[in-house]
Image (cartoon, rainbow, N blue to C red):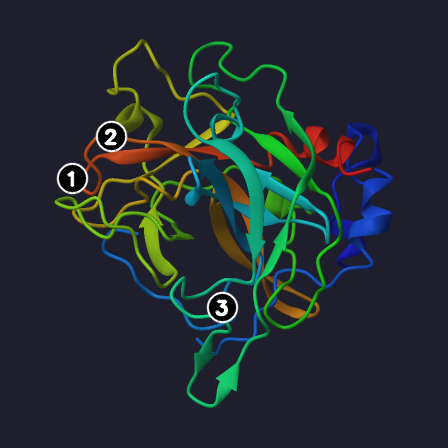
Amino acid sequence: MWKDNLVGAGDGIANHPAWRKLDTLDCGEYAGERIIGGYNAALGQFPWIVRLGYIDEDDIDWMCGGALVTDRHVVTAAHCVQKSDYGPVLSKIRIGEHNSKTNPDCELSVCAPPVQDRGIKKILSHPDFNKPAFHNDLAIIELDAPVILNNFVAPICLPRTKEQLQTVRIGEKLIVAGWGKMNMTTEERASILQVVAIPVVSSAKCDSFGHGFRVGESEICAGAENNKDACGGDSGGPLMKIYDTPEGPKNYLVGVVSFGPTICGIKKPGVYTSTPFFLKWILDNLE
């Protein structure tokens, strides 16, 4: 029955050769039992969330996030990987972090393995990023060596069935997580991974950011609740949805944090790049 629900082969998705690699990996499952306005995530709750580290003088600044989709590929936002003649340079990917102040991380009587740091072999931004401005904000990072998969480091699932590839519905809650700013009045970022559920809202609510921006079918508009939001430091991180599968509930990557209002958590929504819309491009670049 599950196989019957896969999208048709003619669209270049169902029989894409990248699935051969993806099907060898357990995805979307977490070891835990259980952002602005967010709550501390449980240890191991989101084992696919990674941090992007940038060299700033002699220090590493973890300014963006991403999602592990294989043992060596990360999906993130294109604006997080753009090179600049000035400012920090993306140089390191950290996997398996929960609390940035401890390593290894422990919760109750359970300890995770130490974090895994990887260098970058290749970065591929979507060729139409910023065409027009602010759109197609998606990139793939290939690590310089595969990560070691365990209960606390594992890939998230990519959408595959008809249901998973359908447009998300207005009002449904999606999950976003990251180490971004904790509230609207401080620049301090979270030390413990934060998680919050936010509702999908109409595209019109995201069309008021100026710059002539209009949400298209390649984006999701979500948020618009006071003090619940993705914020600075969360860019590139995953927007997630749980689907039931024959193997049990699993987390799927439905979006990537792109941008939002300058002041976070003020009842204005944020814009997320839709991963179902770009699925073929993602699969094409996981070889």
N-terminal label among 3 and 2: 3
Residue at image coords 59%, 30%: 139
Q: CA distance from mark 3 to mark 2?
A: 28 Å
Q: Is residue 252 above or below residue 220?
A: below
Residue at image coords 48%, 37%: 55
Q: Are marks 2 and 1 in contact (CB under 8 Å)?
A: yes
Between 50 and 13, the residue placed more toward the observer is: 50
Q: CA distance from mark 1 to mark 3?
A: 27 Å
Which residue position holds label 2?
261
Which numbered marker is on residue 119? none
Which residue position holds label 1?
266
Tell me the quarter of the image containing the N terminus.
bottom right
| Crowd class of label 1 (few under 14; some 14 to 19; many from 20; radius 10 Å) | some
Tell me the quarter of the image containing the C terminus.
top right
Which residue position holds label 3?
45
Expressed as whole percent of the image width and height from the top left, the position of residue 107 reads: 43, 81
Would residue 104 be seen by someone viewing this image from the given angle? Answer: yes
Residue at image coords 47%, 26%: 79
Between 129 and 226, the residue placed more toward the observer is: 129
Q: CA distance from mark 2 to mark 1?
A: 8 Å
At label 1, which amino acid type do we have? Ile
Residue placed furthest toward the bottom: 109
Q: Quadrant of residue 26?
A: bottom right
Q: Quadrant of residue 25?
A: bottom right
Expressed as whole percent of the image width and height from the top left, the position of residue 193 reads: 39, 61
Q: Is residue 283 left or right of residue 196?
A: right
The kind of secondary structure element at disc 1 is loop
